Amino acid sequence: MSWNAFELCSGCLKHLGKIMILVVSAFVVLTAAAMLDAYGPCVGHAGAGEAAGCFTGLLAFFFLVVMLMWSYFAALLTEPGRVPSGWSPFPSDEEAQLESDRAEVGSQEQGKGVAGSGRPRYCRKCHAWKPERAHHDSMAGRCVLKMDHYCVWIANTVGLCNYKAFLLFLFYTFWACALAAAMLLSEVVHFFKGLDTVAPEKSSRFALTLLAFIVDIAFALSLGGLLGMHARMVWLNVTTIEMFEKQRVTQWPFDRGPKRNFQQVFGISPWRWWLPTHTKLERARMLDAALAQQPSEAAMGTEFAVL
């Protein structure tokens, strides 16, 4: 008997995802409180030039906070991409049913379901056909279009429809952490320089600043690496799952060039690139493109991928 550790732990991961929502919220509150404590008094009591600098820094930080929280909840609440019930890559219902029956009783060795192979792909867990780049999501118990991965931080699967929001969440969080760390650094340096003359009450308040500074540095470094990885994936039009597949298609059929690959994720309108949403037209086009891929004639008939 083969054990699927992911399925066995799915309940734990779902509960952990709920906890991570609180962790993200607590992190935002911690950093915001530290920034207000460090630079809030400066806005009202410093000279005009210094006050303007403090106000500008706080304004930029809280703008990034608003955008990262918008992106976060968009990624969390958006349906990642459901395969329509009854979808099949075959031109007729009769042929689809015939091939489904063959897939149910066929050997799993008939195909490994390599992305981009062009063969019809059948999911034995859903008992249904699935389009190219769709994969079975054990957490949701169904297949997801252009599935990238399950992210415990957003308590949701990252797929076709919420990948943009997920990337913008990473982007805005990285810059919010980097800005906060840069602004809090001066507070940390000033504190340790005047450690012998610091009042006890200020020392206790500094603990908040130091904790926020350390957390911001850690998040900025980790998110920087993650953003770099996903930037390369957007450039090549591949998902996390496809990046780590053991078998790969030599000539990747989904690579349309960097510009078109980018537009497939973020859309055509430059001003909407920064917003974690898709218009109805963009969403319809994305779904049509994901569902319209038909297998080649050479792949029809005797070969199909059973997953």
Image (spheres, rainbow, N blue to C red):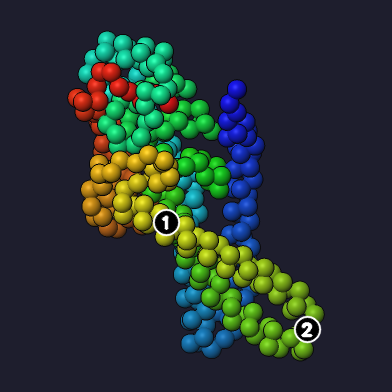
Q: Which amino acid does the dot numbered 2 rest on?
A: Ala
Q: Residue furthest left?
A: 297
Q: Quadrant of residue 101?
A: top left
Residue 82 visible in the shown view? no
Q: Is residue 48 left or right of residue 11?
A: left
> Residue drawn at (57%, 86%), measured in percent from left and top?
46
Along the viewing direction, whichever of 6 and 151 lies nearer the viewer? 6
x, y (%) of residue 6? 58, 35
Q: Are marks 2 and 1 in contact (CB under 8 Å)?
A: no
The quadrant in which the C terminus is found is top left
Q: Is residue 198 above or below residue 279?
A: below
Give the residue pinned by disc 1. 229
Based on the displayed image, in which of its 4 quarters is residue 19 positioned? top right
Nearest the viewer among 46 and 118 is 118
Residue 210 percent location from the top left of the image: 67, 72
Give x and y (percent) for residue 66.
Answer: 48, 58
Q: Is residue 219 above or below residue 278?
A: below
Name the image quarter holding the N terminus. top right
- On the image, which quarter does residue 249 sit in? top left
**Marking on residue 199:** 2
Q: Helix, strand, or loop for circle 2?
A: loop
Instruction: From the viewer's perspective, tell me whether residue 240 is left or right of residue 300.
Output: right
Give the answer, above or below, for where 303 lies relative to 81: above
Q: In the image shown, does 287 or 68 lie closer to the viewer? A: 287
Residue type indicated by callout 1: Met
